Image (spheres, rainbow, N blue to C red):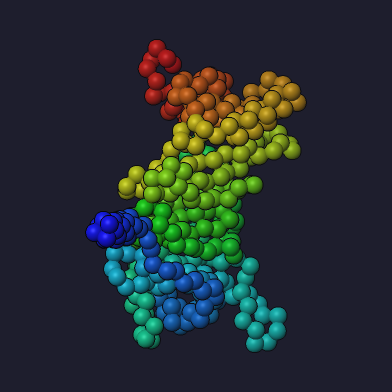
Amino acid sequence: MKKHLQTTLLGLFISLILSCLAVNADTSKTTTSEVKYQRYPEGQKYHRFLLSPTPEELIYVTRMKADANIDDTPEKETIVLILVYMRARPRYKGWRTYGDSWIQAFLFIAEADTKAKLPKKKDAFKFFDAGEPALDVPAAKAIELQNPPFVFTEPPEDALKSRDLSFRLANLTGDGILDVWIDSVYGVAVVSFQNGEFKEIFSSYTIPTDQEAEYVDLDDNGSCEIKMPYSIQIEGIPGAPYLPWMSLYEWDGTTYTLNNEKFYAENNDYLIRLLGQYNYQLLRHGEIINLLEPYKFYLGLVYYYRSGVKPGGLQWVVEHGRNENYIQAAKSILGKFPPEQK
């Protein structure tokens, strides 16, 4: 009996060790280092990455700072977001004031060494290069926000320079290394450590309505999809509500690519909302081509994403549409079908 008990306890002990090893093996691929964020930190030493001394007409504001490991080295990095403002006229003597919106934004990645007076820069990115004067930082990689495919309106340029610009760190690509998600009200960009260097792997405009841009692992495969909402204005119809649209991107191992089929195949909400608006405008205005064209186009896209068959709405756009953007986009999709299906 005693021997049997010892054997049982030994078996349980070995099972416990193996289960611990299994847990460690599984989590080692997904765990990331602790992230320490700081809003509006003391940032004078990071301003040296720009022009020093600061030009008289400009003000540098260190908006956000984080310490975390975001590459394949064991040491942490410091990630710093710096906004550049035009100096505003002071209301009171001696006050340091700045304008309502920034003219440039920079993300700097440096070695996290608190003992160093001058941090060592690893990489730099420049966002939304607009406004005068614009700083010239040759080592900064420019990131230009891209328009989502099949969306032909863009937010006003001034709207991109929002005070809400910020970043957060998350393992989007599923490789166990934190990526940098930078977002504002009207755009998102992602910087990731890939093949030995930091690079932009995603950027897009967005015009949100009741939803915001977000990342989420829809299929539980370890990498996150990116959902970019858009609000599309209907020209020529006073008071018409904006059309809701969502673009879904997934990680393909190199970059983020559009995969709306994955989103619209199971999502009925957008189809219902589009049909509801389309029917309302049809009853209100009747069969007026230039009023119905956007609805026909986006309904045709949804049916194409959901079924993969030739959408009649897109054929209608090719034959009756007036907007060249819609016509060419519809032709590009219809061109994927065999001639007998066109």
Left/right placement of residue 310 relative to residue 113 reads right
In what quadrant of the picture does the C terminus appear? top left
Q: Residue at x 47, y 39 (%)?
A: 149
- The vertical placement of 233 against 141, above or below, is above
Q: Residue at x 71, y 34 (%)?
A: 237
On the image, which quarter does residue 112 sit in? bottom left
Residue in front for this viewpoint, 274 or 52: 274
- The vertical placement of 283 against 128, above or below, is above
Seen as rendered, the residue at the extreme top is 340
Residue 277: where, in percent of width, then height? 68, 31
Q: Is residue 140 visible?
A: no
Left/right placement of residue 336 relative to residue 81 reads left
Seen as rendered, the residue at the extreme front is 1
Q: Is residue 333 visible?
A: yes
On the image, which quarter does residue 20 sit in? bottom left
Q: Residue at x 41, y 54 (%)?
A: 172
Residue in front for this viewpoint, 79 or 87: 79
Left/right placement of residue 291 relative to residue 28 reads right
Residue in front for this viewpoint, 263 or 82: 263
Q: Residue at x 47, y 24 (%)?
A: 307
- The vertical placement of 289 against 236, above or below, is above
Residue 105: where, in percent of width, then height? 49, 66
Residue 92: where, in percent of width, then height? 70, 84
In what quadrant of the picture does the N terminus appear? bottom left
Residue 278: where, in percent of width, then height? 66, 27
